[in-house]
Image: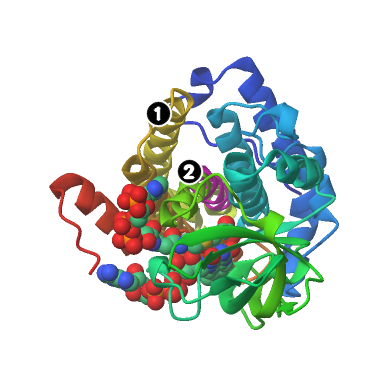
Amino acid sequence: KDDFNGVDFYQTEALYTHEQVLIRDSIRSFVKKEISPYVEKWAQEAHFPLDIVPKLGKIGAFGPQIPESYGGGGLDYISYGLIMQELERGDSGIRSTASVQGSLVMYPIFKFGSEAQKSKYLPKLATGELLGCFGLTEPDYGSNPGGMVTTFKDNGNHYLLNGSKMWISNSPAADLAVVWAKDESGRIHGLLVEKGTQGFTAPEIHNKWSLRASCTGELVFQDAVIPKENLLPLKSGLGAALMCLDAARYGIAWGAVGAAMDCYETARKYALQRMQFGKPIAAFQLTQKKLAEMLTEITKAQLLNWRLGSLMNEGRASSAQISMAKRNNVSMALEVARTSRQILGGMGITGEYPVMRHMMNLESVITYEGTHDIHLLILGQEITGIQAFN
Ligand code: TGC
Ligand code: FAD
């Protein structure tokens, strides 16, 4: 039974408004009812539960920060963060589905799309009637997306798109892909590619040990026929794609804390029950050290998130601040998951407990949306003014 009741050593709840607490609690209840009872089975069977998509839409998990007039939740950034925290407390793959839909598909259409594109896609994406994906990474261009070789060219009344994208969350199940590709002059643009488009396929990537309850795939374009009205008209360049990443990375900074809280709580409860040498293992100093350090790191990450969320609400957060939070919190969560797994001993490797699943999921989370080291280099550039990527 999922009896999770939060981890809040520094009473951060007092920093939230009444509405933010209500939103958090409603997502927490949703996770207990719709995710926790099933997620272990989904992960063990590498099953993406497509029917969760409209349910996520119904609870407002898609585009919470997008105005209500465009189908979003019209919420502030702390509410958005708390939604991601609670979803990832359930599973990083479920949070991924929500991150991609809201921050990587709805956000670029909202920010860079025409009114016709917004009214055609945003309401259906918000309810989960349509599922989207975001294609930036390519087989040979991961950390360096600016080098991408996917291109499109003018072919009369439409474009022809050629190339491929790799590691795309949701892609095999998606109805719509936001794809980043270069025009004939080498400028990057976003294009909306619908499922069923001639020359377009989205094969699934199998045999993942991570994010097994989320589907991941490729996007393959062979003279794919893209109507001209599907180009996102209001911004081009790599910066447009990176703006979407900022929105998603912010959500991940919160989500990772959710996974860490679940691992910590599981380890704390287990340590109090598990007897060795005639005592609960929680009575040993080494276990207490592990628990105390985990709680300290979770608390620091919660405060970092709250402050970052406040800056986001004021429109004052920088990309480097978002990078610091994504990098710190995901790395923290992975360390908490590994330590929790040790506290659980052999039981820690089984699906009886959520810890190993979170740990394996977080290996993707520390890689996608910019790897741990790429975020360090973003911070290095911010500190020194010197770019050390190449
Ligand atoms: P660089 O020359 O630094 O920048 C190119 C242009 O972009 C502007 N810019 C930004 N704009 C908005 N937000 C940001 N965070 C920005 N960072 C840079 C920049 O000012 C410039 O503008 P302009 O007008 O001068 O052209 O670009 P670079 O090629 O040197 O690369 C910089 C680097 C390495 C930081 C960037 O490429 C990067 O972040 N790489 C990591 C790639 C990445 O994060 N990929 C994620 C793919 S999506 C994904 O993983 C989804 S997982 C989803 C899930 O399941 O949850
Ligand atoms: P590489 O870029 O090849 O990096 C390999 C290693 O080299 C890393 O440790 C990296 O830090 C290091 N490295 C690279 N460059 C430097 C440098 N300059 N200095 C120091 N070290 C460096 N992408 C999308 O577009 N959309 C998605 O929906 C999406 N979903 C994903 C889902 C999953 C499950 C996974 C695993 C990935 C997903 N990605 C997605 C791709 C993800 O963003 C990339 O995996 C990530 O950006 C890293 O790219 P790469 O895997 O090619 O690694």
Q: Is residue 351 left or right of residue 378?
A: right
For numbered disc 1, what is the local secondary structure?
helix
Name the residue rendered at 78%, 76% in the picture: 198
Circle 1 is placed at which residue position?
Answer: 307
Specify whether residue 6 is in view. no
* Callout 2 amino acid: Tyr
Residue 250 numbered tag: 2
Q: Is residue 235 left or right of residue 145?
A: right
Residue 302 colored in magenta in the image: no
User: Relative to residue 121, is residue 306 depicted above or below?
Assistant: above
For numbered disc 2, what is the local secondary structure?
helix
Q: Which segment is the magenta one?
A: 251-266
Q: Position of residue 377 (x, y in %)?
A: 26, 58
Name the residue rendered at 65%, 78% in the picture: 221
Count up the numbered dots. Answer: 2
In the figure, residue 142 lies in which quadrant?
bottom left
Residue 262 colored in magenta in the image: yes
* Callout 1 amino acid: Arg
Distance from the alpha carbon under mark 1 to that under mark 2: 12 Å
Are there few (<14), some (14-19), or many (20+) residues within 10 Å of tag 2? many
| Precedes in sequence: disc 1 or disc 2 | 2
Residue 118 numbered tag: none
Name the residue rendered at 48%, 52% in the picture: 236
